Amino acid sequence: MSKLKITDPDVLIIGTGAAGLSLALQLPRHLKIIMVCKNTPNEGATYYAQGGIAAVQQAQDSIESHIQDTLTAGCGLSNPEVVNFVVEQAPKSVQWLIELGVKFTQEQQDGELKYHLNQEGGHSHRRIFHAKDATGKAVSKTLMQHVLERDNIEILENTMAVDVITDQTRCLGAYLYNNKTDTVTTLSARAVVLATGGASRVYLYSTNPDVSSGDGIAIAARAGCKTNNMEFNQFHPTCLYHPQARTLLLTEAIRGEGGKLLLPNGEPFMHRYHERAELAPRDVVARAIDAEMKRSGLECVYLDISHKPYQFIKEHFPNLYEQCLTYGFDMAKQALPIVPAAHYTCGGVQTDLYGQTDLPSLYAIGETASTGLHGANRMASNSLLECLVFAHSCAKHITSTIDLDAPLAQLIPWDASKVINSDEAVVITHNWNELRHFMWDYVGIVRSNKRLQRAQARINLLKQEVQDYYSQYHITRDFLELRNLVIVADLIIQQAIKRKENIGLHYNIDAIDETVDKPLSA
C-alpha cells in the first residue's frame, strides 16, 4: 500500500466485478482511478456467473415484452422508470461488450451464424446472450484485460474498505485495510464508488464466493445512506447438493433448455405450483422445492436434463458438465441432486439513475445498489445487465460533475494506537457461524413472526459484541467481514419485520395473504 503509483486518485472504485470494471473503462482516461479488490481480480461473483445478459434482439421479441417480464417478476415493486431505462439500454450495453471482445455463443441458423439466445425463468422470449455456461468468466476476463491496459488505473489487491470518510456533507475518501501487510491506508478521492457485490454470505448456504459479505451495503449504512428492499433475498433454486460443492450453482439455463425438477421417485412437481412449471420465477421455484423437501422430509430434490442428447449437453453446458463430473455426477446420464441456496441480494443502497446515494460524492452500483430495477424479485440475467447500464450512467455523472480543480481533502490518518492484538479470535469464528446459521433457519426462504423476532434478539447481541471487539482489538479481514455481515443481517431482519404482506422473495407464514405459492391443484 505504501508503493501506490496513484497517490491522489480522482475516483476510488471499491470492487472489481462487472460494475466496477465497466465503470473504470467508461471513465475518461485523464481521470486517475484506484480500484480495490479483496483477493485478486476476478474473484467476485461476476467471474462465476453462468447465465448471461438479457437484451432484446429477435424480431418476435420486444423492448415492451422485456419491460413487462421484469415488472411482473418484480411483483409490482419495481420502479417503471428504472425498468424502462435499463431495458432500453440493454442492446447497446451488450454491443459494447461485443466490441470489447466478449465472444458470446453463436450457432448456425438458416445458414447464417447468429447469436444463440437462452430463455430463463420469468422471460417470455429467448433473449439471454451467453458465453456457453461461463458468461461471467468471459465478461470479467475481457473487462480486466482492457483495464490492465490503462495507465490511469491502478488495482490494489488483497485490500478491502473499512469505512468511507465523510464530513457530514459529502464523501471524502476511505480507510483501506491490506490483508497481506496488515496495515490501513487513508485515501482521499473526489468520488468513491461502492461496487462490492451482494451479501449472500450472510446465509449458511450460498452460491456466491466468500467475498460476498455485503461490504458496500454495510459501509454505506454506517455512513448514513438509505437502504431498502433488503428483505428480498433471492435463493437460487438449484445448487448441487454435495458436501464439497456448497457453492456450485446449476444454471437456470438448464431448466430453460428443458431440464425437469423431480422428486426422488422421478415424479415432476413444478406444474402443481405454477402454470409455467420449471420456467416460473426463481422465488416460486425455490419455495416449491423447499415445500416439497419439508413435506416429505427430503434432503434434496433432483434436476434432470439427461433426456437431452449427450452432444447437446456438452455444447451448451461444457464447464458445468466437467464440474459435475469432479463430484461424481454425469448430467448427461443422471439427474443431479439439488437444494436452494442464497444467491442474490435484490435490495441494497438506495440510488438514483446515476448510481448516486444520498451522500454526495458516494455512489453505489451493481448488486450493492438498490436501483429499483428488481423490486421484490430479480428476473434471471438482469443483474449483469444492471451492472453495465448503471456503470455507464454513473461514469457520465462523475465525468460531468467532478471538480478537478478542487483540492483533495486532508484526512486524519487511521489511528490504531489504542487497540491491542486479540487473543480471542475464536469469538469471530463462533459469531460468524452462529450468524449464518440463524439467518438460514429464521430469515431464509420461509419466515415467521416468531423466527424473525428470535433473529432480531440475537442480532442485537451480536451487534454489541462486534462493536466492543472493534473498539478494543486490532482489525483483521475476517473481523471486518463479520462486522459488515452483522449490519447486513440487521437490515434484512428489520425490513423483513416491517414487510407485512407476502410478496416476491419475502414469504412469512404469518402474513395475512395465505394463498401465495400454494399448489395450483390445491
Image (cartoon, rainbow, N blue to C red):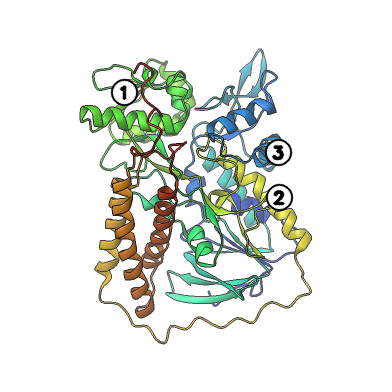
Earlier along the polypeptide chain: callout 1 or callout 2? 1
Q: Give amino acid for label 1.
A: Ala
Work out how far the residue at label 3 is from the one at label 2, CA to CA, in angstroms. Answer: 10 Å
Q: Give amino acid for label 3.
A: Gln
Indicate the secondary structure of the residue bearing disc 2.
Answer: helix
Earlier along the polypeptide chain: callout 3 or callout 2? 3
Q: Is residue 140 above or below residue 282?
A: below
Q: Position of residue 261 (x, y in %)?
A: 35, 23
Depth check: give the residue in front, 67 or 247. Answer: 67
Left or right: 323 in relation to 104: left
Query: For residue 276, which numbered disc appears in the image?
Result: none
Q: Nearer the viewer, mark 1 or mark 3?
A: 3
Name the residue at 48% across, 23% down.
Answer: 256
Quickly name the residue at label 1. 335
Q: Quadrant of the C terminus?
A: top left
Quickly name the residue at label 3. 89
Q: Give amino acid for label 2.
A: Ser
Q: Position of residue 391 (x, y in %)?
A: 65, 50
Are the residues at dot 1 and dot 3 in contact (C-beta closer than 8 Å)? no
Left or right: 467 in relation to 388: left
Q: Position of residue 185 (x, y in %)?
A: 52, 76
Residue 27 visible at all = yes
Earlier along the polypeptide chain: callout 1 or callout 3? 3
Name the residue at 66% across, 74% down.
Answer: 8
